[in-house]
Image (spheres, rainbow, N blue to C red):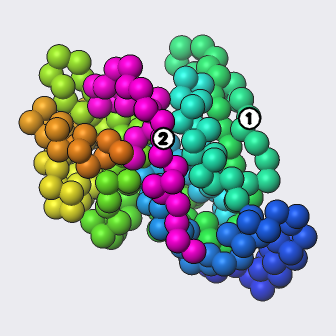
């Protein structure tokens, strides 16, 4: 992965120095390699699910893009609040057509500005596919070291659901290979003590399943990190609580 060119770095620095918001300026200039601790964990979980990193130029900066279904707007607003120091624009509604059904769906999205720190996450999650002639998303090689309750919470909020009746948590990791899904399931098991397995879904794709016997452990570990609007993914209906933002403030 190529680093940013000197020209791109200078352009980025000049734009930052012109920002009126000193908080945004500080976050963008101070954190060069990785995001602050909590945001680092959030972006790992987000990139394992519905998040993506866009890098149009191999020598330029990169940006985080989060696109979710309209029904998840409260959760997307939560993500936007977390990454606001890195954004220059707001949340937008984008219509997406499903070519299989010809139905049009509303999605909600936000993108950050083009910032050097996101280049490192692009390097972590993407590899160049010579056959497809494009970057493809992968599970990081050191995912076991990256796995935390916050990471799992955002992975489940993005791609998880609870199978009614069986009370099995299913995480739809279909975009990854069988080996990658097995590696991700192993990281959850080894690092968090939650038994997770890679199971066949369909069309040669695999997902992660967490059995009913692990539900209480999952709730204990990741419940505090779940946005209230997403508690239903753990089987908690009408869960009434406010998200404790004070508990995730990073010490800078």
Residue at the spot of label 1 = 92
Task: Indicate the quadrant containing the C terminus: top left, top right, bottom left or bottom right.
Answer: bottom right
Number of other residues with Cα within 10 Å of mark 2, as a class: few under 14, some 14 to 19, many 20 or more: some
User: On residue 141, which mark appears?
Assistant: none
Q: Tell me which residue sits at (59%, 30%) in the image.
A: 73
Residue at the spot of label 2 = 243
Q: Position of residue 48 (x, y in %)?
A: 42, 51
Q: Which quarter of the picture shows residue 94?
A: top right
Residue 248 is left or right of residue 30, and the answer is left
Q: Earlier in the sequence, mark 1 or mark 2?
A: 1
Residue 243 is left or right of residue 184, and the answer is right
Q: Is residue 95 above or below residue 172?
A: above
Boundaries of the magenta span? 225-252
Q: Position of residue 122 (x, y in %)?
A: 55, 65
Residue 170 included in the magenta stretch of the image: no
Residue 81 is left or right of residue 158, and the answer is right
């Amino acid at each position: 992965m190529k680093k940013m060119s000197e020209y791109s770095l200078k352009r980025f620095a000049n734009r930052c120095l012109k920002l009126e918001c000193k908080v945004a300026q500080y976050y963008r200039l101070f954190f060069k390699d990785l995001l602050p601790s909590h945001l680092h964990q959030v972006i790992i979980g987000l990139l394992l699910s519905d998040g993506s990193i866009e890098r149009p130029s191999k020598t330029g900066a990169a940006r985080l893009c989060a696109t979710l279904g309209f029904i998840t707007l409260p959760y997307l607003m939560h993500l936007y609040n977390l990454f606001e120091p890195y954004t220059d624009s707001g949340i937008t509604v984008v219509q997406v057509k499903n070519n299989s059904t010809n139905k049009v769906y509303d999605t909600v999205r936000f993108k950050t500005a083009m910032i050097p720190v996101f280049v490192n996450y692009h390097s972590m999650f993407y590899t160049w596919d010579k056959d497809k002639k494009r970057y493809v998303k992968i599970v990081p090689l050191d995912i076991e070291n990256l796995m935390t309750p916050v990471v799992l919470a955002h992975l489940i909020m993005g791609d998880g659901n609870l199978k009614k009746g069986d009370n099995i948590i299913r995480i739809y990791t279909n975009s990854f290979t069988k080996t990658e899904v097995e590696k991700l399931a192993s990281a959850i098991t080894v690092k968090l003590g939650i038994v997770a397995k890679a199971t066949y879904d369909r069309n040669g794709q695999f997902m992660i399943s967490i059995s009913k016997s692990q539900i209480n452990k999952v709730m204990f570990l990741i419940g505090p990190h779940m946005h209230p609007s997403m508690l239903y993914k753990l089987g908690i209906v009408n869960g009434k609580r406010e998200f404790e933002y004070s508990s995730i403030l990073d010490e800078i």
